Image (cartoon, rainbow, N blue to C red):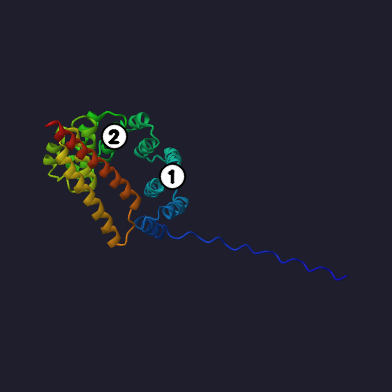
């Protein structure tokens, strides 16, 4: 029997070096701009393999995880960041808020600097805890911060706090029209209902319905995703509120005779 040939020794190929960190950050930025947050997390992990304590990469990863609703994973990153001396306390407070651990979240915020972001989160926590007056106080301090949708939340807070009569004065002070957005029109109509101004509320609800339809049509025109389910749900609520106003007006008319 012929002798078996000796197996050739395997040559291990050298491991491919990672891309330059500058290229990784360029890729990370591109994924974030395109809202490809799952890919952003993967690229952030690549950066952290090369530079484990890079604060920018850690923060980008945390934000991308939040965008992906991976709240438990965010908390793991926050916990691991303690040994790297990277302060992610605000993100932990936000995650606790998302988990409806409102009291614990509020405790974490106490050690944070009073920035617009921390104040806005605190106002949302106070709203969830039913502390409407404290919530409104923060909203009023934030009026000069030019935060998107601030007036929408402020009107909702005033109505919930039983201060519907303050809504119009607040809108005037902020120089905002009630018909500027669907949400603001609806919330302001709710304040009018609380004040038994059913005719004015009905007209504002009709404006809210028109704004909702216009917004959806604009989305279709721009070929972006139109939130049809949200639109239909909003239209149902608006129609129900308008019907309530009409019913109240009819009852009031009957009582006059």
Q: Which residue is mark 1?
A: 70
Residue 218 to residue 77: above or below = below
Q: Does the image show residue 140?
A: no
In the image, farthest residue toward the bottom: 2
Q: Is residue 99 left or right of residue 9?
A: left
**Position of residue 129 measured from the top left corner of the image (x, y, whole percent):** 31, 29
Q: Secondary structure at mark 1?
A: loop
**Position of residue 193 measured from the top left corner of the image (x, y, whole percent):** 19, 36
Q: Is residue 59 left or right of residue 130?
A: right
Residue 145 to residue 222: above or below = above
**Position of residue 149 measured from the top left corner of the image (x, y, whole percent):** 23, 44
In-front residue for pair 110/204: 204
Q: Quadrant of residue 188?
A: top left
**Position of residue 74 measured from the top left corner of the image (x, y, whole percent):** 42, 42
In the image, farthest residue toward the front: 257
CA distance separating discs 1 and 2? 22 Å
Q: Which residue is mark 2?
A: 122
Q: Are marks 1 and 2 in contact (CB under 8 Å)?
A: no
In-front residue for pair 26/163: 163
């Amino acid at each position: 029997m012929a002798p078996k040939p000796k197996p050739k020794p395997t040559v291990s190929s050298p491991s491919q070096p990672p891309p330059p960190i500058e290229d990784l950050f360029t890729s990370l930025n591109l994924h974030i701009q395109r809202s490809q947050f799952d890919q952003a997390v993967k690229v952030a992990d690549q950066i952290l393999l090369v530079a484990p304590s890079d604060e920018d990469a850690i923060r980008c990863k945390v934000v991308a995880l939040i965008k992906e609703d991976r709240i438990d994973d965010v908390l793991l990153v926050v916990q691991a960041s303690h040994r790297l001396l990277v302060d992610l306390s605000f993100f932990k407070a936000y995650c606790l808020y998302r988990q409806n651990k409102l009291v614990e979240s509020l405790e974490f915020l106490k050690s944070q600097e009073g920035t617009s972001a921390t104040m806005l989160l605190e106002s949302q926590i106070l709203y969830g805890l039913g502390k409407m007056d404290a919530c409104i106080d923060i909203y009023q301090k934030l009026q000069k911060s030019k935060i998107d949708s601030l007036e929408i939340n402020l009107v909702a807070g005033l109505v919930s706090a039983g201060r519907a009569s303050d809504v119009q004065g607040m809108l005037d002070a902020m120089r905002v029209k009630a018909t500027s957005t669907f949400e603001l029109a609806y919330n302001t109509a709710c304040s009018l209902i609380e004040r038994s101004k059913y005719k004015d509320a009905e007209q504002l609800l009709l404006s809210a319905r028109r704004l909702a339809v216009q917004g959806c049509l604009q989305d279709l025109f721009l070929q972006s995703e139109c939130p049809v389910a949200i639109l239909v749900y909003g239209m149902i609520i608006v129609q129900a509120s308008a019907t309530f106003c009409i019913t109240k007006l009819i009852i009031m008319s009957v009582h006059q005779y």
